[in-house]
Structures are given as C-alpha cells and as structure tokens.
Image: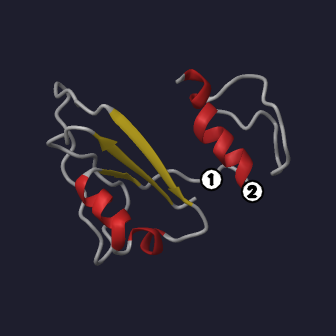
Amino acid sequence: MTLALLAACGPSPTAHLPSPSPTHPNTPAPHASPSPGAEADAQHVFLIVMENRSYDQAIRGGYTAELANQYAVSTNYHGVSHPSLPNYLALTSGSTWGIADDGWHSPPVGGLGAQL
C-alpha cells in the first residue's frame, strides 16, 4: 500500500498535516501542521488506500489530487505483510491476528468498523 489519503469532511480545518516523504513533482504540496492547541472540527474522516500503485500514480491529477490538496495526506504507511488481507487487518485493528492469507477468517475481536 503506497498511499493512505485522509480526507476530513465537514468544515475544512485551516491547517494540514505535513508529508514525511519528499515532495514529488506535479503533486499537491502538504500544508503546515496545526499548532498543538488547535482543535480540528472535522465531523468525518475517510481513509482511502491506494493499493498496487506508486505514490505518483495514486496522487497524479484527478479527484485524489484535489482531496490531497484540500485535506491531508499520510505517506508513511507501509504494508506489514503480503497478501492484502493482513495489511487491512493491521490498518483497522492494530494486528494481523496471525492471518497470513486472503482467505475468509473471523478475527477474535472487532476492528475499527465494529467500534463505530
């Protein structure tokens, strides 16, 4: 997974998170971090994961570039395993639960979706 795009819906915060990776040509530049005392008034958070694409492919033009320019981009998330399912489990629950394939499994606890 090469890009995780966080887009907060609702009133747009005035500051954005920095990108820890180098700036790529023709891509939206990240904005300054919010000050420690600043409160975000985001009502929703969307996580868009672009799998099997490089950062440049995922962010080049189009709607994802608009979202990245308007909201925040997190570029330092890396897959913890191959194939995909363990990565999604780790992303949403904090663990792969020993799962190492893309088969049907019932993890012992609910992830982020169950908590919402």
101 relative to 49 in the view: left or right: right
Residue 66 against residue 9 in the figure, above or below: below
Residue 99 against residue 66 in the figure, above or below: above
Name the foreground residue: 35 vs 65: 65
Callout 2 amino acid: His
Give neighbour class at mark 1: few <14, some 14-19, many 20+ (Cα, 10 Å). some
Question: Which quarter shows the N terminus?
Answer: bottom right
- CB atoms at circles 1 and 2 under 8 Å apart? yes
Asked if residue 35 can be seen in this view, the reply is yes
Residue 82 against residue 28 in the figure, above or below: above
Kindly identify the residue that appears in the image at 20 percent across and 38 percent down. 11
Q: Position of residue 109 (x, y in %)?
A: 72, 22
Give the spatial CA distance, label 1 vs label 2.
8 Å
Name of the residue lying farthest toward the bottom: 25
Q: Please name the residue that numbered disc 2 is placed on.
A: 82
Kindly identify the residue that appears in the image at 62 percent across and 53 percent down. 79
Q: Please name the residue that numbered disc 1 is placed on.
A: 79
29 relative to 20 in the view: left or right: left
61 relative to 115 in the view: left or right: left
Quarter of the image holding residue 89?
A: top right
Checking the image for residue 47, the label placed there is none
Quarter of the image holding residue 21?
A: bottom left
Report how many numbered discs are placed on residues in the image: 2
Q: Position of residue 106 (x, y in %)?
A: 81, 31
Asked if residue 22 can be seen in this view, the reply is no
